[in-house]
Image (spheres, rainbow, N blue to C red):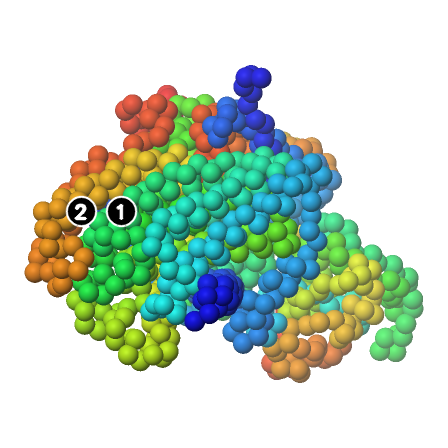
Amino acid sequence: MFDVHEMEVNFGPQHPSTHGVLRVILKIDGERIIEAKPVIGYLHRGTEKLFENMAYPQCVPHTDRLDYVASATNNLGYVEAVEKLLGITKQIPKRAQLIRVMLSELQRLSSHLLWLATHALDLGAMTPFFYTFREREEILDLFEAYCGARLTLNCMRIGGMPDDLPDGWLDDLEEFTAKFDPAIDEYAALLNTNRIWKRRTVGIGVISPEEAIDWGITGPPLRGSGVEWDLRRAQPYECYPELQFDIPIGKNGDTYDRYLVRMEEMRQANRILKQCIPMIKETPAGDIKAKISRVIRPPEGEVYHSIEAPKGELGYYIISDGKTQNAYRCRVRPPSFINLQALPAMAKGYLVSDLVALIGTLDVVLGEVDR
Amino acid sequence: MQVEYPKPDWTEKFLLLDLFEGLKTTLRELFKPKVTIQYPEERMEPTERFRGMFRFSFDRCIGCKLCAVACPIDIIYIDVHDETQMVDGKPKKLKVLDRYDIDVKRCMFCALCEEACPTKPKSIWLTTKTYELASYDRNDLYFNMQQLEYWEDRPKYTGLPEENAKPQIEAGKPAPAGARLIPGSAE
Amino acid sequence: MNPWMLFFIWPVIKFLIAITIVLTIVAAMTWVERRTLGFMQARLGPNRVGPAGLFQIIADPIKLMLKEDILPASAEKVAYFLGPMIPLLPAFVVFCLIPYGPPPAFAVTRVNVGLLLIMALTSTAVYGIILGGWASNNKYSLMGGLRSAAQMVSYEVPFGLSVVGVLMLCGSFDLVKIVQYQERHVWNLLPQLVGAFIFFVSMNAESNRVPFDLPEAESELVAGYHTEYSGMKFAFFMLAEYASMLVNSCLMATLYLGGWTFSIAGYGLTTAALSKLGLLGGLIGAAIFFAKVMALMLVYVWFRATFPRFRFDQLMDLGWKWMIPLALGNIFVTGILVLAMPNLKIDAGIYPYGELLMAVVGAAIIALTLFLVTRGPRRPAAAARPTEPPKVIHASRVSEA
């Protein structure tokens, strides 16, 4: 009669705050989490297997669907990996590189805005959602003007870019960058010093730098723990070495630090965009593609290339057998999947309400976790 | 670069200034113009490059099947047969299309087919600014050649003047001034 | 007058009018809330049905009535049906006790322990939520129900304690007398600033509104206690929430904002001034009252647009460790002042030490709060935090680390 047993709750896959189809099996004692076990695979589409049966250029639209809120960086990682395999990384024209950088920084902004929106909504603050989406719409408008799509962009090609920038695009971008910093200040006014927000985030889900490195966590969660590791700096690609930006790092490794790191990253991304605009005006118009053959058949070999996606290190490992136009094997290293494995250890001992904050702060996208 | 932690002093803490900061922000937004687009009445003007519904030109198509090859999900079905026709008084072997179907319901609008098309201007293009493609019957979204070329009954972007909404480029003639600019076309 | 008329028919008519007003305001409030919230969030809110979306008020209930009423297979049927009814009743009954205009016409009844009765009735609403949450046989509902129970019980205490200061000043439980005290002196908001603050926070918590909307926190508990409810039963829960908001706002307007009067130190639109105008005066009084109520309701909406949600233990923390001591301190200080200056009590006319009283009360409570605030919030997971800040590892040294 008096035996006490913990309650088991299925948190997801249909739940408002699991950001898609994440399922967490919770063992809870009252509201305190004893054990959290993430169950994934509800969005598995076999993308890696699809890559084996598809010519290299055809894979690009499929990479859009990995992290479907940051498709430009997915494209970038894939095309760079193939370019590395082909050995044409150096031949990419400067203008194409700058367009790539601009698109991926815009994508970083858009992804972080979506993260802020959902993270704040999960913690009960409803309004940042709408403010961030207002700015995100403008970023999507820029994407649409460049490549014709808003979300699944398919905006990069092996060896360069599909199109040059349309007329007036840079002016629109300049206008956007000018008003984006005040917009960040507006989100910060709602949350940064808010005592309720701080109570919900300070000291929640602490990851020490050693643990973060052991788990292989990358991206803002790693930097929030105080490790200054950003692939844009550590393994520079495209024209990032020519650009000035800071890598924000936190100190305590809690949810609040990760929040601050991402907010600062948005400011830095905006700073990069501002630098790109005068640089791209100096490059010759139309010089956006390296001279490569239409049929892409890389030599036999393998390559691993990773870039700094908004959520962390996004790597592609491609093996080519040198005979076909398809990859023999393509493995994607998605940041969300690796970051998600910290969830059980982070959630232990916290309340159900904090689990929501933790899922939000890890910023997982299930399309990428399940692939 | 270490992130900065906001350090409210005791007056801010005591007077709940952090909470009032948020309240001030939402109150200010109350009087700002709104960004909502009221959809059925107001519609977003798609950009020039917007990838929407397909349009196909039978006269321009040379039946090379490059678009079908480029399609990542193989939804373009093409059948051709060879035919000898008189061109400029000389007999010439030409490919004639029997079938050009697109299973639009499976399409992901990546526009790789448009990019692969070798004709100038393109014989298959997506820059029609049409995005209201929903249908009550999934079979409505399987388009054959005729439907792809003449889908005036499809809902289309209504904010444009009527003459711009229709394709203006006649087969074999240069595009009239003010016509849509198709990416990758002769211009 | 015929006693039947006086004690039965007339009250019933007034009760029906009161119910109509409640339902109208509650229905209108759903529209006002969604519209205001929309405007604060850079969007428009519902504007499709009728002029400016006003018919949304009608469209929503019609839609809910036409929806299928789902009964979960393993639900406890009786409790499941009772759940949505229980919170609705006290909200309606309580509204009969609130004077929303100059007496005697503009209140259904006048009870000399009105305030006590209201507190007693409003606290019964929690039964419905617990019953509904438990009877749905859903773990999220159960958690929502339990959260709600704990929250309402906890905040009932500061809610009651904060009113004591008003009672000491006014010397009566009768809401009419409390309003009449305020029109002769000043709105209780000023001398009872801290009390009003506590009352306001507690009333937010009592009606499960942001930032205290934990029982129905949609990002944590899906929809909390009404996860399994649909159709009209769900509408009843919503109705109860809005009715409780309305009742609390009415109470706040009466206790702290001078009710139907708009006067200071006996000058302005007092009861006497309104009575001279007859029925028109009564209507003006009611209009003033409802203007105050609507302003408070909009503050609810404003809060909802701005704040994140508390965590459950933090909510309890705030209730037990902050609000209750603060309310007790408020009672203590107010008590000393009322005793020290007996001529400040009710019917003492315009007091000479009014400003002094306010200043002293304010200063004392500021000091008390300051003492509490500067202690700072306790970090809930102190054990899990690293004792010293981790050292910064730079990219070049990651391999060493």
Provide the residue designation for mark 1.
C164
> Dividing the picture into quarters, in which one does residue B183 lie?
bottom right
The earlier-in-sequence mark between 1 and 2 is 1
As rendered, which of B98 and C177 lies closer to the eye?
A: C177
Q: Position of residue A251 (x, y in %)?
A: 31, 33
As rendered, which of A332 and A21 lies closer to the eye?
A: A21
Is disc 1 in the same subunit as disc 2? Answer: yes
- Chain that bears disc 2: C
| Residue occupying the point 44% across, 36% down | C150
Crowding at dot 2, Cα within 10 Å, few <14 / some 14-19 / many 20+, comes out as many
Question: Tag 1: residue type?
Answer: Val
Q: Position of residue B120 (x, y in %)?
A: 69, 68
| Residue occupying the point 42% across, 31% down | A205
Q: CA distance from mark 1 to mark 2?
A: 9 Å
Provide the residue designation for mark 2.
C334
Q: Position of residue B65 (x, y in %)?
A: 79, 57
Left or right: residue C105 compared with residue B92: left
Q: Are marks 1 and 2 in contact (CB under 8 Å)?
A: yes
Question: Tag 2: residue type?
Answer: Thr
| Residue occupying the point 23% across, 65% down | C183
Q: Name the quarter where the C terminus of chain C is drawn.
A: top left
What is the number of the mark on residue B13?
Answer: none
* Element at label 2: helix
Left or right: residue C154 compared with residue A321: left
Crowding at dot 1, Cα within 10 Å, few <14 / some 14-19 / many 20+, comes out as many
Q: Please tell me whether residue B1 is drawn above or below residue A342 in the rendered image.
A: below
- Chain that bears disc 1: C
Left or right: residue C175 compared with residue B50: left
Q: Position of residue A240 (x, y in %)?
A: 41, 45
